[in-house]
Image (tube, rainbow, N blue to C red):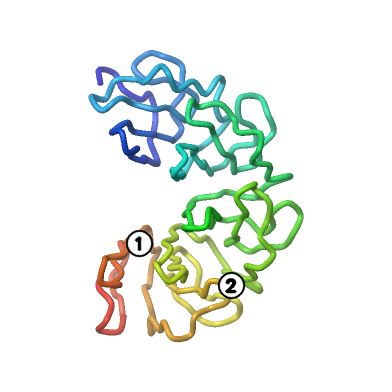
């Protein structure tokens, strides 16, 4: 793709048609202005039919593709194409802002991870402590219209960054990051939540990881892959690292 992006790419998402959404801190792709979000053709060239206007005004850390082709983005931005959006937004398939997704005042800190549930609700994690004025420490669930889902209640939540989220088929949610507790219970950088946001005590990582859990992925057999910056990890034998 010639000169490609002129700065960091933090996130990629592959569409069913082979096109690729990229987000990060770049301001151009192959010499064409694209502020922190772009779509590429399968050969790596810029897809000019995806037009974000002036795009995001700061970092895009995470992207998630909906079944209808719309795109959830999260990061450390305060506007998209000139419209106020604090760290979370939804785009139409052509790159324009989806005004039907209204997060209100949004997240008051970085959104570093997004995960879609089968019912269209959206799990977000990061370093925020509130969403649209309601206390939510680093983890929240949104309705499909961008409003906060009050039925997902994490209590006091995570005590530090949630960097990665994965939704299991049963609705439970794996989270990883820099936290050492969740809702007052010790959990070193790795935990599982019930579908209502409470801690799943049946998932016991022991002393867990002694450093940041960067990403998680789910296998078809229910086992969990994690990537960690670590020197030692203690997990039960029914979990893969």
Please give the count of numbered marks on the rendered protein: 2
**From this viewpoint, which residue is outermost toward the right?**
133
> Where does residue 133 sit, x and y in percent of width and height?
76, 54
> Which residue has dot 1 on it?
216
Assign a secondary structure to mark 2.
Answer: loop
**In the figure, 216 relative to 92: above or below?**
below
Q: Residue at coordinates 51% horizontally, 42% vertically from top-left?
A: 72
Badge 1: few (under 14), some or many (20 or more) residues near its Cα, within 10 Å?
many
Q: Is residue 44 visible?
A: yes
Does 78 sit left or right of 226 as displayed?
A: right
Instruction: Read off the residue under disc 2.
Output: 196
Q: Image check: 227 left or right of 162?
A: left
Residue at the limit of the structure toward the top, as seen here? 31
Q: Nearer the viewer, residue 211 or 114?
A: 114
Instruction: Give the residue displayed 74% in from the left and 59% down from the top.
Output: 134
Residue 135 appears left or right of 171? right
Q: Is residue 166 above or below residue 82?
A: below
Residue 151 vs residue 10, the one in the foreground = 151
Q: CA distance from mark 2 to mark 1?
A: 20 Å
Quarter assignment of residue 158: bottom right
Image: 162 above or below 96: below
- Quarter in which the N terminus is drawn: top left
Q: At 41% from the left edge and 14% from the top edge, which residue is drawn? A: 32
Q: In front: mark 2 or mark 1? A: 2
Of the image marks 2 and 1, the number of the one nearer the N terminus: 2
- The location of residue 140, given as percent across then percent down, is 60, 60
Label 1 residue SS: strand
Report which quarter residue 28 is drawn in: top left
């Amino acid at each position: 793709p010639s000169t490609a992006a002129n700065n960091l790419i933090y996130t990629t998402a592959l569409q069913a048609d082979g096109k690729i959404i990229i987000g990060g801190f770049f301001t151009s792709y192959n010499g064409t202005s694209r502020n922190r979000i772009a779509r590429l053709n399968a050969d790596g060239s810029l897809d000019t039919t995806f037009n974000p206007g002036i795009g995001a005004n700061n970092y895009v850390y995470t992207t998630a593709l909906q079944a209808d082709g719309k795109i959830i983005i999260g990061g450390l931005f305060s506007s998209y194409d000139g419209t106020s959006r604090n760290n979370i937004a939804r785009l139409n398939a052509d790159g324009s802002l989806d005004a039907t997704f209204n997060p209100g005042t949004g997240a008051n800190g970085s959104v570093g991870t997004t995960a879609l549930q089968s019912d269209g609700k959206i799990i977000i994690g990061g370093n925020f402590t509130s969403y649209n004025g309601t206390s939510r420490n680093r983890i929240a669930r949104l309705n499909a219209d961008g409003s906060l889902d009050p039925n997902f209640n994490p209590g006091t939540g995570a005590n530090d960054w949630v960097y990665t989220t994965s939704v299991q088929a049963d609705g439970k949610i794996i989270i990883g990051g820099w936290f050492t507790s969740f809702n007052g219970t010790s959990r070193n950088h790795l935990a599982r939540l019930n579908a209502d946001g409470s801690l799943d005590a049946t998932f016991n990582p022991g002393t867990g990881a002694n450093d940041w859990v960067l990403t998680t992925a789910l296998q078809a057999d229910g086992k969990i892959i994690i990537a960690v910056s670590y020197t030692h990890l203690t997990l039960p034998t029914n979990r893969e690292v």
